[in-house]
Amino acid sequence: MIWAATVLLLAAPADPRLLLTQYQLEGRLTEALTVVEETIEEHGNEALPPGLDYLRGHLLEQLGRDRAAYEAFALSLTTATPLAPYGRFRIALNQERRGHPEVSAGLLATLLADSPPKRLIKPAVAMLAQAVEAGADCRLLSNSARWRLEQPPRRRIELAKASCEEAENRSGEASNRLLSLLEGGIDDEAARLAAERLSEALGENLSAESSILLGRAFHANRRFDLSTLYLKRGLVRLGREDLEARYAQARGYFWREQYLLAATEFGKVAAATDGSETKARALYQQARSFELNGSWDAATSSYRLAYLAETDGRWADAALLSALRIEWRTGSEDTALKLYEVLASQRSWSTLFEKASVFLASSEIVRSRSDRAGAWLQRARRARREPSTDASYWSARLAELQGRPEQAFELYLEVLTDNPYHPLALAAHRRLVGPELAATTLAQARRIASGSNTAGLYSAILLLPADDADARSARERLISRLASKPAARSFLQATLTDPADWPLWKASLARPEELLLALGLWGEGEPAMLKHFSIAEPDLGLTAVDLLERAGSLRPALRIAEILFQRAVSEVPIDLLPNVLRRSAYPLHFRELITDRSRQAGVDPFLLAAIVREESRFDSEAISAAAARGLAQFVLPTAERLGVKIGLETVTAEDLHRPELALTLGAAYLAELEDRYVDQPYAVVAAYNAGENQATLWQSYCFSQEPEEYFSKVGFPETREYLRKVLESREHYARLYSPDSGSARTPIETSPAASAIGSK
């Protein structure tokens, strides 16, 4: 992405924003600072536009002149512009970075008392809490009840208050405050820290109820070693049954791979409850525990009991399908087919009925059996309004097996044109150009290439070699047809908008975020980005993505890029889109780190990039609902285990937000999985998401080593979608960033302020 070099001034000679924008885009920060200082010197406090003094501090900071930046930001507070809260925050950040946390804390407390812009609250609270916990004056929090804070930042302040009470030897009050935090919620960062502190402070000196509460908090944050310890302790002391606590304890044993213990505890829950839904849930999880332990007879029995506990409940169809799989895989085909007919009995079970049909059919086809598969696939394709990609792919495989090449061609083409990057579409293409179908494919492709149908022309492009004369002709005619449509043409010709043409300059800018955008502070101005860079116009949408990437606001940039990309592919086939648009949706941030860590571990850098894209959206501060952290989204126990393996003495939760460590661990884990699943890349990706034992269980459902069979037999919808997305992304990365595909622009380094304000 290269910006135009033209520099135009705005209508008002005193307004230098366009020139400043151009300089910042080109990385000419010294020249930009000179323009700012000359404008301020010439016009004084009446300098236009508002915020130049703030921009001066920002540029000084970018140039490494922290002391001068501090003075500039301090001066910006006296001009009473709408950016004053931002200036105060930047001064606090400056002081914290220069080793004066107590000064920073005072500034932040003042800022929070004045109801700052929403996007400043989270980083301001985090910095203030850390400063207080490190020894800053606790009295700064005395009026925090009056601050207008939402629940998450308010909980972080409460945690800091508990630290103050501990420092003042008021341990009882601190413990009560921490327990109150857990009573208010167990699954956020404040709960994790509160649970860790309570565990250290009180250990065994907790009541039964508090032990259970602590155990549930550790469970929510994936510390199952601690969760099972405290839940067991609390249940023993409680003197009565607590089914949810016992269920959580069972889940903890399950995630620690203590499957027989988990099955026992799930059984206790099922025996103790009168609720049909709770009983069905517990029995289903008991069956999963038995299955992962290899106790398949016990698993089948529990799955059947789960179904019988609530025959029309939420676990019924999943239990039937799970029992069917085991019966079929262990050779009890007649029993499996009886379960199949029960699964067919309710229309609301159509999704899992289709999965069962594909499971049965694919099991036959990979073993070159064709007599029963056709009927199952017909039922699969009728089960839903639109047949799934799996049903179409395996129908094509059956046609090929039965010696019907023309029908196989049509079905494979259906899969391929629906989404050419889908894992099964890639498999369909390999079969279409393989020895069995190559002649049919070539003849059909040349036939449709001679027509004028848009879909046919695209099919020919997908099927014929890129240097084939018919393929080139089809591509030219298709592009010509698409270019005649305004919407398609706008995507085909998409490029960055020249700064002189930004609508921003013609708008009335009142909000602080709008002023920041106009000053070239795109990360801080992100909330106003789409107002002035609408994705309704592809050029402006691409420009928004580029500006946010430059500012280090990678998650919002990718969010916009994906919306733009989906609109584009509704008008233009993916492979005809310009690379500038495709790379915006599949960016390769942290490219050097990904390449280096992948090389050291001996894994595919494009696969690591694809996993990072889907796991964290390239947001190094990401924390999932399951307490997974950082670019590669590790929970702490897995990170600690991998850390020991690669020679690290300790790995903390905070360490996982460091890109260099996260990517080192991610590459190491991929290498470990590839050693376990040799030449089985789909199992590697599935294991990254669902765990190794579960990925291995799905392997046991398969009758071949074909990755396509594995893909169709992955049982969790979430993992199936994850597997699809990662494999699609990996293919995009390989096509876009391989050495012969050209190089991508690397975003400029993220500024400390942009990171701190939460722009990533």
Image (cartoon, rainbow, N blue to C red):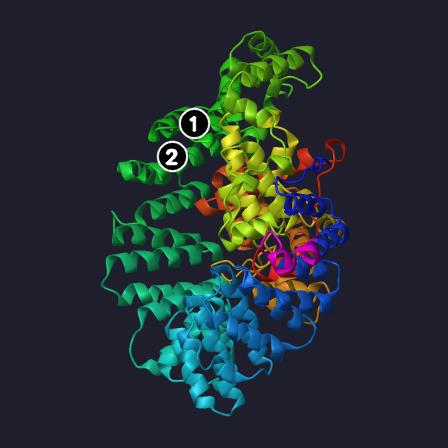
> Residue reaching furthest bottom?
169
Locate the N terminus by quadrant. top right
Query: Can residue 688 be spotted in the picture?
Result: no
Residue 93 x, y percent position in the rendering: 63, 68
Task: Please tell me whether the stretch drawn in magenta is mainly helix, strand or loop.
Answer: helix
| Mark 2 Cα-neighbour bin, 10 Å: few <14, some 14–19, many ≥20 | many
Residue 400 in the magenta stretch? The answer is no
Rendered image quadrant of residue 53: bottom right
Magenta span: 39-53
Reply above or below: 608 against 414: below
Cα separation between marks 2 and 1: 13 Å
Residue 99 x, y percent position in the rendering: 69, 76
Residue at position x 56%, y 36% in the image:
540
152 sits left or right of 671 in the view: left
Residue at position x 49%, y 37% in the image:
712
Q: Give, as a three-letter code, the residue at label 2.
A: Glu
**Image disc number at residue 354:** 2
The residue to which callout 1 is attached is 373
Locate the C terminus by quadrant. bottom right
Residue at position x 30%, y 63% in the image:
270
Q: In what element is the residue under mark 1?
A: helix
Towards the viewer: 382 or 270: 382
Residue 41 in the magenta stretch? The answer is yes
Q: In what element is the residue under mark 2?
A: helix
Q: Give, as a three-letter code, the residue at label 1.
A: Ala
Residue 460 x, y percent position in the rendering: 59, 16
